[in-house]
Image: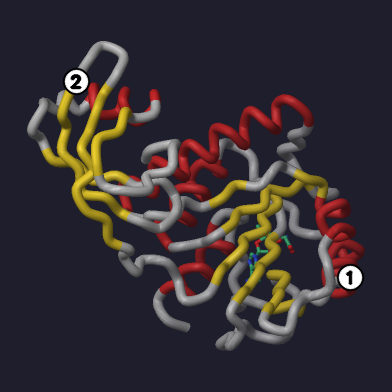
Amino acid sequence: FVDIPLTSPGEVSLSPGAARHVQVLRLQPGDALTLFDGSGLEWQAVVTAMGRSEVRVNLVAATQPRRELDRAVTLAVVMPANDRMDFIVEKATELGAAVLQPLVAERSVLRLAGERADKKRAHWQGVAIAAAEQSGRTVPLRVEPVLPLSAWLAALPAPAADEWRGVLSPRAVAPLAPIAAARASFLSGPEGGLSDAEEDAARARGFAAVTLGPRILRADTAPLAVLAWLALGA
Ligand code: SAM
């Protein structure tokens, strides 16, 4: 991943993070590599110079591979504790989510805010970029700033005509069913679940309450199960 726009063929100097990556891989001038800048393009390139602080490459040709899901999926996840967010970010990237919105709710065990939350968000964005590199995604998952669930819901506009919203609830009666909308957002709760008031607030913002079946899934399994279901063509 290169943190600068790659716009046209020719020689460029890699951004510091990408240069470090190339140095760790011990590539040499003449070696081929694949680069992406998050725009959706994938560049075939050749290393032209390996310096101590600078790596230069020749951008040869770009393609726009079709590896994104047909619909933009947002996972709004009340963060589970014990570093399970790293797992969620990695797997959500592999499975094609567009946006991950980390949230804190009434029954959250992990209550991040302020500088700690910002640091974690930067760390998760790094996890998403590494997972994009591994999985061949040319557009990494975007990790949004951590927010209280109530604030996130309050700022959400009414759903657009092409958007579907669901809140995952073990108590819901309606099963998840195929979705036609071009955009979909799923809200899932923490270890202790969402409170009734939180589920009501989500419904007031256009979220349909849906169940994923009779078994209780862990807070990391539930959003990833929905995403896998969508990614495989539901
Ligand atoms: N006792 C909690 C409750 O009743 O909500 C269990 C919470 S579960 C460990 C964590 C989150 O995963 C839930 O808040 C919900 O969003 C989602 N979840 C787990 N199992 C689910 C199911 N069978 N159907 C829908 N959502 C589920």
What's the mark number on residue 200?
A: 1
Is 153 placed left or right of 168 in the picture?
A: right
In this rendered view, identify the residue nearer to me: 220 or 127.
Answer: 127
Residue drawn at x 83%, y 67% is 157
What's the mark number on residue 138?
A: none
Q: Is there any visible trace of residue 81 in the rendered image?
A: yes
Q: Quadrant of residue 63?
A: bottom left
In this rendered view, identify the residue nearer to me: 66 or 14.
Answer: 14
Tell me, yes or no, whether the two marked residues, 1 and 2, touch with CB atoms within 8 Å. Answer: no
Is 192 placed left or right of 88 in the picture?
A: right
Instruction: Give the amino acid type for the residue marked by disc 1 in the picture.
Output: Asp
Q: Which of marks 1 and 2 is in front?
A: 2
Considering only vertical position in the picture, is 179 above or below 214?
Answer: below
Instruction: Give the amino acid type for the residue marked by disc 2 in the picture.
Output: Met
Residue drawn at x 59%, y 57% is 99
In this rendered view, identify the residue nearer to me: 215 or 61.
Answer: 61
- The yes-or-no answer for disc 2 within 8 Å of ligand 1 is no
Q: Name the residue under label 2.
A: 50
Q: Is there any visible trace of residue 195 in the rendered image?
A: no
What is the x, y in percent for residue 59?
Answer: 23, 43
What is the x, y in percent for residue 135?
Answer: 32, 53
Considering only vertical position in the picture, is 156 above or below 6?
Answer: below
Is 133 placed left or right of 188 in the picture?
A: left
Gap between marks 1 and 2, in whole Å? 57 Å
